[in-house]
Image: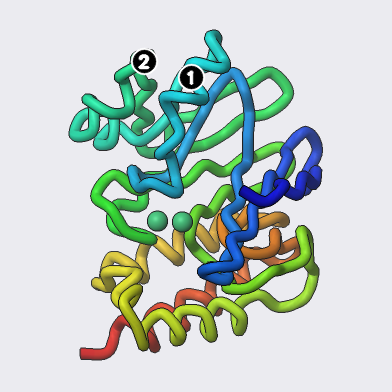
Amino acid sequence: MPEPDVTEIAPDLYRISVFVPEINLQFNHFVRIRWISFSHTESDECGSLPEWLQAAPSATPVCSQIGALVNRDFVSTVREARGMADGETLETGKYRFRFLRTAQLPHGWDAGVLYEETEQTLLCSDLFHQNGPCEPITESDVVERARNSLREYEAGVLADYVPYSPRTDQAMQRLAELNPRTLAIMHGSTYVGDGERALHELNGVLRDIFGEA
Ligand SMILES: [Fe+2]
Ligand SMILES: [Fe+2]
């Protein structure tokens, strides 16, 4: 396992990045120890959740209500998960995380995202996925990188990343309306800039790639 690269990408929010050269991809984790949240149940999102909960005895898993229900055997194995309703907030003292249910976006019935409102940071999971070794933070465009990465995946075994439906557009518009300043992206660089615009542009990319019959 290569050494992780740790960068504070927003106040008190650390991006712990591991690059796996075999598949040319970074895996970024945005860690807080009192609460351990994830977007959807998948090995790279939360496969090590039990180990994290063992290592941090006061930590509670946080996921969507659906995730807490349908994946109960996994998410609540060590400690009962807090299942978040759409629009509900998680207060952590200085910060306030609003949960948005985004079922099937990027994928998974249980998918959702957290938006930290005081610093305007969107923890956006697989959205804006960028292949390759990327700098920790960028103010340059990440949408074209995401388009190229998704196109690459469409050509191989990782095709069909996002199940596209009319609800995809609605969910992306809703995320754009948050007007985030920082996009904490799971694979690739964190983006700082006009998050509203980037989300609208990514919405177009998703439609171009996954909306075609
Ligand atoms: Fe995923
Ligand atoms: Fe992922």
Q: Is residue 120 above or below residue 86?
A: below
Mark seen at residue 78:
2
Q: Report the amino acid beneath label 2.
A: Val
Q: Nearer the viewer, residue 7 or 119?
A: 7
The numbered disc on residue 152 is none
Residue occupying image coordinates x 44% and y 30%: 49
Residue at image coords 38%, 21%: 82
Q: Quadrant of residue 11?
A: top right
Question: Looking at the image, which is closer to me, 188 or 54?
Answer: 54
Q: Amino acid at mark 1?
A: Leu
Label 1: which secondary element: helix
The relative height of residue 49 versus residue 189 in the rendered view (above or below) is above
- Which of the 4 image quadrants contains residue 144? bottom right
**Is the C-beta separation of discs 1 and 2 under 8 Å?**
yes
Q: For the residues marked 1 and 2, what is the alpha-carbon distance in whole angstroms?
A: 7 Å
Left or right placement of residue 126 versus residue 156 in this view: right
Residue at horizontal 28 percent and vertical 65 percent from the top: 167
Q: Position of residue 53 (x, y in %)?
A: 48, 19
Residue under pointer 1: 53
Number of numbered discs present? 2
What kind of element bears circle 2? loop
